[in-house]
Amino acid sequence: MIRVYSAPQQGMAHYGAARGHPARGALVRTRIEPPGPQDDTTGAPEAQMTDTVKFLLDEEHLPKHWYNINADLPEPLAPVLHPGTKQPITPDDLAPIFPRAVIEQEMSTEREIEIPQPVREVYRQWRPSPLFRARRLEQALQTPARIYYKYEGVSPAGSHKPNTAIAQAFYNKAEGVKRITTETGAGQWGSSLALAGTFFGLEIVVFMVRVSFDHKPYRRAYMETLGAQCIASPSDQTESGRAILADHPDSTGSLGIAISEAVEMAVQRDDTRYALGSVLNHVLLHQTVTGIEAQEQMRMADDYPDLVIGCTGGGSNFAGLAFPFLRDKMKDELGTEFIAVEPSACPTLTKGAFAYDFGDTAHLTPLVKMYTLGSGFVPPGFHAGGLRYHGMAPQISHLAKLGLLKPRSYNQLECFDAGVQFAKAEGILPAPEANHAVRAAIHEAEKCRESGESKAILFNLCGHGHFDMQAYIDYNEGKLKDLQYDEGEMAMALAGLPSGC
Ligand SMILES: Cc1ncc(COP(=O)(O)O)c(C=O)c1O
């Protein structure tokens, strides 16, 4: 029997007391009660059945600030360079593509940045998102590890991406922008910006990477239903798209190419700006709402993570969960480990070079110092489309270089094995991208089973896979394969890294 109840405020003082964190108001908890005489028995042990599985914060506990890790980095980030002069860029250089408020955030070193009230109003529709203790998974794995996951699939678009889409749409609207262009890999980001566009009355144009456009017709339908225009990339609508198609008429596309198309279209009209769904400082900043909530929810669980895990495409969902905990680690010298998980077929952090590179294929963006496989690298068309990016967020790259996070890669099939194992235990079907985090979390929990250690493992279940059913159909029919990148192509892309910066 599952009972949901709202606990009265005065009864909450025990939450977090053991760790000295005062309780902060009414909490809603779900308990799985032991079966009564009339109940069907589930066969689960009684000890498990009396423990909390879901940690919920009410709307009043929605964070009021985002956390900016630039304030606490042991060494500052390398400057972003102008692609022509190779000198540090100024806010004016970015003005044709981003609104002023976003440019300020990109360059800010303020520790806390206020979340504007209209953004919080929209967040309230699904935030604070739940934190689950994966008790059924723990039991299935027979592990002494305590596994927690922050579930971002509860947003209307189904992932963490609206956390920044809503903020970016708000700032654009406030500065009179009428139209926003963007790219999307898996379709999650495009869907999120389409959602933000409909909330704030903005026209949205999405360049969707060809392979995802073909794999995921329902993502396109979602975006179009919300009023966005969705174009397969490379397309004949831009010079950069036409140039790619001339050389590679069957190009599967890549995030780098789609970014070029979206930026090119944005700079052509005064009323249009561009929005990026990951990589940049302001995007990672907006995602920290996730980690700030998770800190509070871990206090409710009277626990603290030994391991924090997230998948990394451009780095934003990982950063969102990890940065507030990294702040604790840097401040209090904690032993928490941070694991960034990427696909073996697009191994940016594990095999890339740490160098200045372009964020896009046509070299329209500024140069950023990051781990990169080269802006010309086109990864194979595996299903986790949101992880098919040649670069990595400068903040994540910097932290990896400093040894503050540990990158790791897995193949497609082992990630789907883990995703299905997770779905069978917890009932949620993860997005293919999120399966990478699930893979690592299960791997770590299995290690605990071998060693007998009881670590607390926290991971970001950054999206559901309800639009990714073709991938699961292929998996169930045994058709899903591991795809390898072409060594020669990667070497060529890396050889083409810009020089003189
Ligand atoms: C569900 C999901 N997870 C992860 C990612 C990767 O992006 P990031 O590393 O910015 O979180 C994407 C990108 O589209 C995504 O859709």
Image (cartoon, helix red, strand yellow):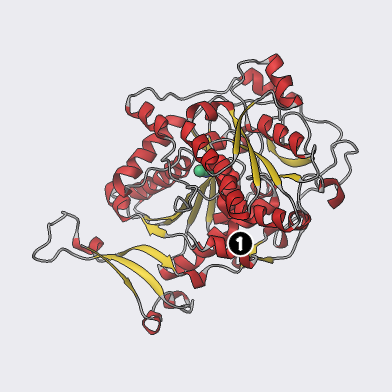
Q: Quadrant of residue 35?
A: bottom left
Residue at the limit of the structure toward the left, as seen here: 37
Q: Quadrant of residue 54?
A: bottom left
470 in relation to 182, above or below: above
**Viewer-side residue, 10 vs 271:** 271
Residue 390 seen from this side: yes
Identified by mark 1, the residue type is Val
**32 left or right of 92?**
left
- Which residue corresponds to the image point at 44% horizontal and 38% vertical from the top-left? 467
| Quarter of the figure with the N terminus | bottom left
**118 left or right of 124?**
right
Q: Position of residue 14 (x, y in %)?
A: 39, 79
Residue 408 seen from this side: no
Q: Position of residue 351 (x, y in %)?
A: 62, 32
- Which residue corresponds to the image point at 36% horizontal and 45% vertical from the top-left? 446
Q: Position of residue 66 (x, y in %)?
A: 63, 63
Q: Which residue is mark 1?
A: 119
**Viewer-side residue, 428 vs 162:** 162
**117 left or right of 87?**
left
37 in relation to 216, above or below: below
Q: Position of residue 320 (x, y in %)?
A: 58, 54
Q: Determine the secondary structure under disc 1.
A: helix
Ligand 1 lies in which image quarter? top right
68 in relation to 153, above or below: below
